[in-house]
Amino acid sequence: MIETASLLMVMPELILTAGGLVLMMVAAYAGDRTTVAISWASVGVLVAAALSLTGLPTHGGDAFDGLYQADAFAGFAKVLIYVAAAVSIIVAPRFFSQGGALRAEYPILILFACIGMGMMVSASDMLTLYVGLEMNSLAAYVLASFMRQDERSSEAGLKYFVLGALASGILLYGISLLYGFSGSTSFAGIAAALGDGVSNGELFGMVFVLSGLAFKISAVPFHMWTPDVYEGAPTPVTAFFASAPKVAALGLTIRVAIEALGPAGMAWQQIVIFVALASILLGAVAAIGQTNIKRLLAYSSINNIGFALVGLAAGTPAGVAATMSYLAIYIVMTLGSFLCVLQMRDADGNPVETIASLSGLSQSRKGLAACFAIFMFSLAGIPPLFGFWAKFLVFDAAVSAGLTGLAVFGIVASVIGAFYYLKIIKTIYFDEPVAAYAPAGSRIEGVLMTACAAVVVLGYLLNPVLDSASAAAAAALF
Amino acid sequence: MGGFPILSLMMAVPMAGAIACLFSGAQTARWIALAATLADLVLGIVLWAKFDQSGRAVTWQFTEYAPIFGKFAWALGIDGIALMLIALTVFLMPICIGASWVAIDKRVGEYMAAFLLMEVLMIGVFTAQDIYLFYVMFEAGLIPMYLIIGIWGGADRIYASYKFFLYTLLGSVLMLIAMMWMVHEAGSTSIPVLMGYDFPVHAQTWLWLAFFASFAVKMPMWPVHTWLPDAHVQAPTAGSVILAGVLLKMGGYGFIRFSLPMFPEASAQFAPLVFGLSMVAVVYTSLVALVQSDMKKLIAYSSVAHMAIVTVGLFALNTHGIEGAMMVMLGHGLVSGALFLCVGVIYDRLHTREISRYGGLSINMPKYAALFLLFTMASVGLPGTSNFVGEFLALMGVYKASSWVALVSTTGIILGAAYMLYLYRRVCYGDQLNADAAAMPDLSARELWLLAPIAAGVLWMGVYPESFLSPMRADIVSLEARLARAVPAGDAQIKIGAPKPAAAHDTHESGGHEQAAHAAPGEAH
């Protein structure tokens, strides 16, 4: 029997499911003409789902006999996911209207992806985890190839699908090993089994599970798909990929690492440290030679995931809180950057993606240039912008956990990363102007961009709120 | 002290000006920037006037505290050392704006905004009482300076801007990790608390090195000084002035505020390293300066040599050395700023920094030649000018610690005279070889107004340094007391005899009479 309490705890997912299904029917009968209305309705559904988080879904505890966890950690992650999803929906109609691929399915697919992501961050059983992950991925594969006429978009979707399937296989194999050796699929059961020593089988299972998850967060050495998919996918979809699924997958990784694999801390800590450092370094070095802004942001996201993992590597409540704060700040910076990229259109309104086309932007579009520069300096982690605080928190957690070496290496590598962000600012501010972009067409994008920039500049005033929210989220796991 | 938040106001005024400049036209932006910097100068004068200089005063004055940032606080407050550096900042800023009045003609609003932001951050660095707030201000200064060099700089500005940014960033990030470790160890982010905390000696070594990485680059010390000549040469005139005048002082301020009081044992342990690097710097960069054909590069290298005297003085770890280091910093801030302005004056006319393109300027530009001579002499360290006081005190301080270091460092004064006089001879004396240089008009009223206040300051500091030493005295004495437990015995066994006739006491030094106070530093006056 399903208790009412359990249903109340999954309220956000229920709202999204019902809303998504209704809107899909509307889309099926009304056609693509209603896309803009459906988009706004989807945003409304996301807002409703976010509002429902104020009740049981953030402090209800176990639901469905331990398959699903409704706690503050899930609530924190879900807010970030819904915000990122809503922004990706809002900016889409204008982008697709230019390419003629404006379809009503786009916002609905994002809603379905959100259900999957909500399941991911709330999972407390390997099976819920897997179902949530696949639900998100399925929607994501379609979104990546959303511009069916476009070769690059189709290629991105196919690549994402093939490599994603491989990763799912690895993950599933790891889950089966863990189940075989521990006799349970629930996180608590696995943790109990690991508590009395880690057998070889469990170790293998753990490595496979972490590898599968590393693919989803595009951490080195499972990052290869990221630049191609980011470049090929339509820009609003790329913005979505770079934000919401990152939060979901990283949230999931944290939950698995702490709740399921917690007793084997020493074993996964080494893996996480390696993955973090490799991601930071590769994300920084490989980005230097890029000429396409979306590819560059792809490497930037790899780089950022590396920093976020530094907090997890610490393995302490402070470390987890730091990673969650990092994600919150990262979402704002990334969405802001992609909003800037969306403004990059030539005189005919076609999207441009080369970094060279940004030359001298500061003289033709002052506001856009300033926002772009703010996001780049912030991603580079230069104070007083908020991106610095994100890095500060994870390194602070690492230092207090005794991982000073990791912190030193990571922060030195961040200087390498600063170079390519500076390169963009140099192009925007120092270079001679080239052909100007089309004038800003959408007020709402400008508003969102300005809002992101304001958060990045004045974010320190949010610190008390962010600190208490992320601390509560982290406390839910320990 | 509490009361009126004058320090916040000093940061708010240029901040508001910066935002206003972004949204206004060229001429309006110039006037807004000038008004904002002059308002800050007035506030600075008020600050100095209200600063309690009596020996028994509380160390930290004008304190403000607002815990609004979660893990760190908006904590401000100044002691005498910070006061002097703030005074230098607010004094140089209106001059910088004036120097850019006609030289900058594109994107004026953004330029003025960058400069005003720079002023906010510099005041922030010198007033921050929270270690993370300090770091934020210290690092944030990179952004406006990067833009100033990159947008309004010379031909090779992009390389210079990258080099400036990445060099200083790499130096600073290690300091951040050290700060985190210290805050975890001491359990407080407050700089005054940390200054009184005794860190374990073995940890001090690493912490000191991490801070050294940052401040040595900022200072800059040999061999990590190479960003400075590039940045100076490419930056616009006012950018060079602020870079040499104030930004370099952040390194010295960092040593005084962090390295010395927080890690006394490590400072004593590493003093030989600092001495070694500084001795190389004094001799090497002076020789390099001697062969430069680019005026700005020459002055940039001379800055490195002067800063080496500062580090030598600081790590003498005694009152004279530290007082001298502070005086060199203040004096060098004025003099090098003025020298860059002098270069800027003739650069604006002929658009070249090649020394050989000029010559015999004292014939057609007599006022310019007179002021340039004054600043040249001040840079050389002629008695009666600002740099003499500082260099004399610093070298006297280091003589107590090590005679050899004093000996080698003193050659810097001689070499300094060589390259500065050689520069002056080639620019202002001799035949007028180039017709266009010979036809340049003398200083305009605006340029005269820029240089005259600095000339007055240089002479004031040289003739009556007590005005500048007295606010700092109590702080330097307490710093020496803090260092006392770690200071190694110097090789100069100074024996101070009992001064029998009181009259003989005051007659044996020129340049300033505070040196008479060896026996009981800080108390005599």
Image (cartoon, rainbow, N blue to C red):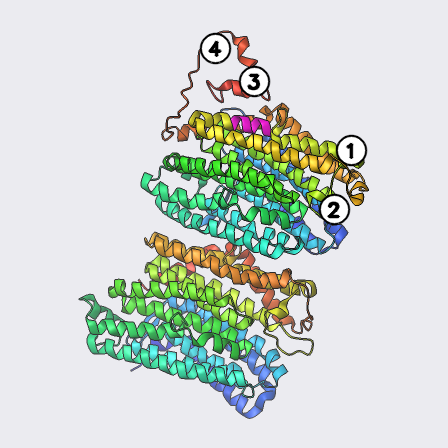
Query: What chain does badge 1 belong to?
Result: B
The N terminus of chain A lies in quadrant:
bottom left
Residue A64 in the image: state x and y as whole percent: 31, 77
- Specify few, some or many for label 1: CA neighbours under 10 Å numbering under 14, 14-19, or 20 or more: some
Q: Are marks 1 and 3 on the same chain?
A: yes
Res. B366 mark: 1
- Specify few, some or many for label 3: CA neighbours under 10 Å numbering under 14, 14-19, or 20 or more: few
Q: Residue furthest bottom?
A: A29
B116 in relation to A146, above or below: above
| Mark found first going from the N terminus, 1 or 3 | 1
Disc 4 to disc 2, C-alpha distance: 56 Å
Residue type at tag 2: Asp
Which residue is identified by label 4?
A: B499
Which residue is identified by label 3?
A: B509
In magenta stretch: residue B494: no
- Specify few, some or many for label 4: CA neighbours under 10 Å numbering under 14, 14-19, or 20 or more: few
Can residue A36 be seen by looking at this rendering? yes
The C terminus of chain A lies in quadrant:
bottom left
Residue A272 in the image: state x and y as whole percent: 34, 65
Could you tell me which secondary element the residue under label 1 belongs to? Answer: helix
Query: What chain does badge 4 belong to?
Result: B
Q: Which is closer to the viewer, label 4 or label 1? A: 1
